[in-house]
């Protein structure tokens, strides 16, 4: 009897103790929510982190704390850190918060440009989640996987489902265009790009996506051999759009296809001004040599061949050396950082940064590497996460809280991961650029051969025509001596408003039979 | 058929298909009586019933030179605009001309992957 009473007292004591603990913890949770609602995300994050670290909470309350911790960090723009508590919520299979956490993770993936986060969300999706979340995104992912495997018809099937669910899904429309071009079905590709372009109708012309959509449309017309339409779209890309530079060489090819050799040379000339001197452009020099050869401007054509050799033979050697050595992660990251410094500089500081450039790989090559699709997303995410790490130190560095080492660990781990990935991709892209230069190196040798052949046949014709002097040679050649048949209505420097205004004034010097 | 005419026929089949007709660079006055062979054969069924209609006068002035791998002249079909603008082209060249920009589109597809 005494024993029974004793047990009852103990049970009562334990229950009241648990109740008071639970009461205190719920009060703490409420306090955190209050901070969050007030917009005091730093205090909210610290409170929720403290709760999520303890073991006194039931699972659903713990999920709530983790979810709000993620939201608080998200609102502090610490997107990478905010993904961790969200993943915890998804793993716990919380009925109330799982779907919300997934939606937030998709947004985080978007903010960071990190496809791996999106892939993770997709892998955790159930059919029941699909109605709540973006079904079109799900089908797009399936289409991307099929595309990567080379299953083009299957990819088109998924893309159509994605577009059916959301006709404004930009990535699906863009991929649909690309897959059709791979199948050499140009009209469906053109249709897809036209629909995509309609989505950007109200966007300004400098909008990057709009620019690249116009560019892709022009490319589709080019592949369809509708060169006049292609030229029209290429010309529609505004100079302040980042797609503009890429459009120039392609417009040059288009003009060549419709026989407008002088127009093609005028376009290519823009790329060979000091404004674009620090860009990797082997193809444009090859095209320039081809065009000049067609104009029978052999001296100029040979200059273009020489310019290619001067610029790219040496580069090829540097890349060969790089590939033959054992490159550490630190070596590759150093190259990336050197180029990043120049890219972040502005005006006169750019010139100074270029003069003191310490990279082993030329700046223009690393710049192209960073723009390559294998690198670009990763590199942009790396820069964002690096900035987030600095913000995290600024926000929480002075706080005596467990959240601080938690964030430090996340950022150190992620940056280490990104560095390793970047180094691997950097070397892969360098290897492909090496092949690219080798290809154009072979092409320029072929062009050189054609120049010699054309020179020979022209000489034969001139002899047959009794050494007739062409009208072009009788012209005053002062301007040729000054600037090699270039004309532009400006003096001195090469500013962005001037580019694209160069005119090629050389004449066709081919002898006729 | 003399050597020049043979060259012309080959040039036509290389450039504009069987329906096209080409002639060497000759005096237009001499060209008139010589009815284009391909057109005549295409219209042979109607030719028996009615007087053969003159084919529209196409601008024919093409010569192919197999030794130097060149095509010289002008022609009035849309596909030949390049030849017309150049007057003379090499029909066989070692270097490659671009046929598509698929790799470039593929390189930038990540730009659109935002939700």
Image (cartoon, coloured by chain):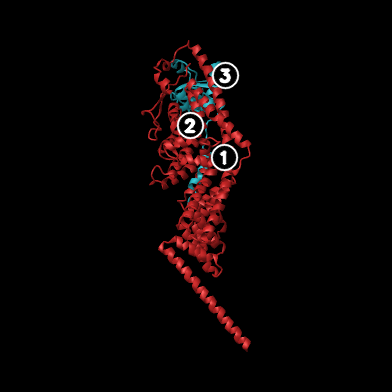
Chain colours: A red, B cyan
Query: Residue A114: x and y, percent?
Result: 52, 51
Say above or below: A469 vs A22.
above
From the viewer's side, name the closer residue of A447 and A85.
A85
CA gap between label 1 and label 3 equals 43 Å
Give the residue furthest to the top.
A466
Q: What element carries label 2?
A: helix
Q: How many marks?
A: 3
Q: Is mark 3 on a helix, strand or loop?
A: loop
Have a look at marks 3 and 2 and say if they share a chain: no
Say above or below: A472 vs A367.
above
Q: Mark 1 lies on which chain?
A: A
Query: Residue A163: x and y, percent?
Result: 48, 51
Residue A438 visible? The answer is: no
**Residue, disc 3:** B67
CA gap between label 3 and label 2 equals 27 Å
The residue at the point 50 percent across, 14 percent down is A461
Q: Which chain carries label 2?
A: A
Callout 2: few (<14), some (14-19), or many (20+) C-alpha neighbours within 10 Å? many
Query: Residue A214: x and y, percent?
Result: 44, 41
Have a look at marks 1 and 3 and say if they share a chain: no
Callout 3: few (<14), some (14-19), or many (20+) C-alpha neighbours within 10 Å? few
Query: Residue B76: x and y, percent?
Result: 45, 26
- The disc at residue A429 is 1
CA gap between label 2 and label 1 equals 25 Å
Q: Is residue A449 left or right of residue A352?
A: right
Q: Mark 3 lies on which chain?
A: B
Q: In which quarter of the image is residue A431?
A: top right
Say above or below: A367 vs A77.
above
Q: Do the residues labelled 2 and 1 touch (CB within 8 Å)?
A: no
- Give the position of the N terminus of chain A as an image quadrant: bottom right
**Residue, disc 2:** A253
């Amino acid at each position: 009897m005494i024993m029974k009473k004793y047990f009852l007292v103990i049970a009562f004591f334990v229950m009241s103790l648990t109740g008071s603990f639970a009461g205190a913890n719920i009060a703490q949770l409420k306090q955190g929510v209050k901070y969050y609602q007030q917009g005091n995300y730093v205090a909210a994050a610290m409170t929720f982190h403290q709760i999520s670290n303890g073991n006194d909470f039931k699972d659903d309350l713990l999920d709530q704390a983790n979810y709000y911790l993620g939201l608080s960090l998200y609102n502090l723009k610490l997107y990478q850190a905010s993904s961790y508590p969200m993943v915890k919520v998804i793993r716990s299979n919380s009925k109330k918060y799982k779907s919300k956490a997934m939606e937030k993770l998709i947004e985080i993936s978007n903010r960071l440009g990190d496809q791996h986060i999106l892939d993770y969300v997709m892998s955790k999706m159930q059919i029941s989640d699909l109605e709540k979340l973006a079904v079109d995104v799900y089908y797009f992912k399936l289409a991307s996987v099929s595309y990567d495997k080379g299953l083009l018809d299957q990819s088109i099937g998924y893309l159509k489902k994605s577009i059916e669910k959301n006709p404004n899904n930009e990535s699906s429309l863009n991929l649909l265009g690309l897959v059709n071009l791979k199948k050499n079905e140009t009209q469906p590709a053109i249709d897809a790009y036209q629909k995509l372009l309609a989505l950007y109708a109200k966007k300004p012309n400098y909008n990057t996506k709009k620019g690249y959509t116009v560019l892709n449309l022009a490319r589709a017309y080019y592949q369809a051999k509708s060169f006049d339409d292609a030229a029209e779209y290429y010309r529609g890309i505004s100079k302040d759009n980042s797609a503009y530079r890429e459009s120039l060489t392609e417009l040059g090819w288009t003009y060549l296809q419709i026989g407008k050799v002088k127009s093609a040379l005028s376009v290519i000339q823009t790329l060979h001004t000091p404004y674009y001197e620090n860009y990797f452009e082997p193809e444009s020099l090859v095209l320039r040599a081809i065009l000049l050869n067609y104009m029978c401007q052999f001296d100029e054509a040979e200059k273009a061949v020489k310019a290619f050799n001067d610029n790219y033979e040496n580069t090829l050697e540097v890349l060969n050396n790089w590939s033959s050595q054992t490159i550490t992660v630190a070596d590759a990251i150093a190259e990336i950082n050197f180029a990043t410094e120049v890219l972040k500089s502005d005006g006169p500081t750019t010139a100074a940064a270029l003069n003191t450039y310490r990279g082993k790989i030329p700046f223009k090559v690393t710049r192209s590497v960073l723009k390559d699709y294998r690198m670009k997303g990763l590199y942009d995410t790396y820069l964002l996460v690096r900035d987030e790490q600095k913000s995290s130190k600024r926000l929480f560095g002075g706080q005596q809280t467990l959240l601080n080492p938690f964030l430090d660990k996340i950022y150190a781990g992620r940056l280490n991961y990104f560095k390793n990935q970047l180094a691997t991709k950097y070397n892969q892209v360098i290897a492909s650029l090496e092949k690219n230069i080798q290809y154009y190196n072979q092409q320029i040798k072929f062009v050189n051969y054609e120049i010699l052949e054309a020179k020979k046949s022209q000489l034969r014709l001139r002899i047959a025509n009794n050494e007739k002097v062409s009208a072009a040679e009788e012209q005053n050649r002062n301007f040729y001596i000054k600037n090699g048949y270039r004309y532009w209505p400006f003096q001195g420097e090469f500013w962005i408003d001037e580019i694209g205004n160069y005119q090629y004034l050389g004449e066709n010097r081919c002898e006729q039979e | 058929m003399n050597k020049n005419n043979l060259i012309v026929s080959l040039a036509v089949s290389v450039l504009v298909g069987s329906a096209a007709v080409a002639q060497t660079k000759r005096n237009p006055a001499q060209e008139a009586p010589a009815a284009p062979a391909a057109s005549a054969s295409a219209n042979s069924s109607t030719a028996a019933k009615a007087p053969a209609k003159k084919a529209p006068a196409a601008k024919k002035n093409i010569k192919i030179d197999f030794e130097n791998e060149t095509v010289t002249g002008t022609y009035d079909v849309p596909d030949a605009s390049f030849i017309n603008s150049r007057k003379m082209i090499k029909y066989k060249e070692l270097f490659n001309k671009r046929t598509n920009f698929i790799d470039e589109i593929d390189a930038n597809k990540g730009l659109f992957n935002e939700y």
